[in-house]
Image: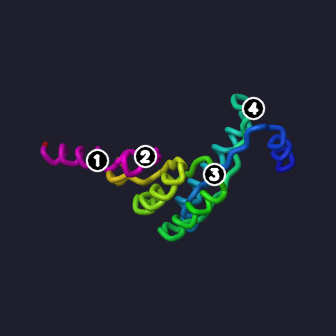
Amino acid sequence: LLLLSLAVHAQRPFNFTVGAMFPLNEVAGISRSRGFLMGLEEINSSDEFPEFFLNHIMLDTKRQTELAIAASKRFISESVLAAIGPATSRNSEATAMILGQAGIAQISYSATAISLCDRAKYPLFARSVPSDSPQGFMLVEILLK
């Protein structure tokens, strides 16, 4: 399988690297990292984008801000196309500043802080979960009923 992957990789003219940050010391982080790898495998084996191949750099952040910042700096030095993660809002705020200044888009899979909605401060940040704002409005609505 590895040899087949390398052969396919060598035949594709556009190779990009995606950085990923997961807390690999936790079950949820391991599960999310496996999902990420499955997604990459699906994209790389798809006939829809035969000229593209996505490589990855996956780093364990252990939910620690210092490790997330170090991962962001490594992604910049490795010229990644985009970054996935990290797991927490606090870490995402730190990495979004660094990655955004380097022109690298970031997608978080679990950061929900409303502050990350600030497009002026975090122009290249996106997330796959809603911010805490809708949850707050729903809680107020439920309490008022």
Give the class, few, some or many, for how many residues have Cα within 10 Å of label 4's Cα (few <14, many ≥20).
Answer: some
The earlier-in-sequence mark between 2 and 3 is: 3
Image x and y of residue 133, in percent = 28, 47
Give the class, few, some or many, for how many residues have Cα within 10 Å of label 1's Cα (few <14, many ≥20).
Answer: few
Badge nearest the viewer, 3 or 1:
3
Is 6 placed left or right of 16 in the picture?
right
Q: For the residues marked 2 and 3, what is the alpha-carbon distance in whole angstroms?
A: 17 Å
Identify residue type, mark 1. Ser
Q: Are marks 2 and 1 in contact (CB under 8 Å)?
A: no
Q: Residue 123 shows which numbered tag?
A: 2
SS for callout 1: helix
Identify residue type, mark 2. Pro
SS for callout 2: loop
The earlier-in-sequence mark between 4 and 1 is: 4
The earlier-in-sequence mark between 4 and 3 is: 4
Image x and y of residue 17, in percent = 67, 49
Q: For the residues marked 2 and 1, what is the alpha-carbon distance in whole angstroms?
A: 19 Å
Q: Are marks 4 and 1 in contact (CB under 8 Å)?
A: no
Residue drawn where x is 38% and y is 51% of the image: 121
Which residue, given by chain and number where applicable, does mark 1 sit on?
133
Q: For the residues marked 4 and 3, what is the alpha-carbon distance in whole angstroms?
A: 20 Å
Q: Is residue 132 magenta?
A: yes
Image x and y of residue 40, in percent = 66, 44
Which residue, given by chain and number where applicable, does mark 3 sit on?
80
Which residue, given by chain and number where applicable, does mark 4 sit on?
50
The earlier-in-sequence mark between 2 and 1 is: 2
Q: For the residues marked 4 and 2, what is the alpha-carbon distance in whole angstroms?
A: 30 Å
The quarter of the picture where residue 5 lies is top right
Badge nearest the viewer, 4 or 3:
3
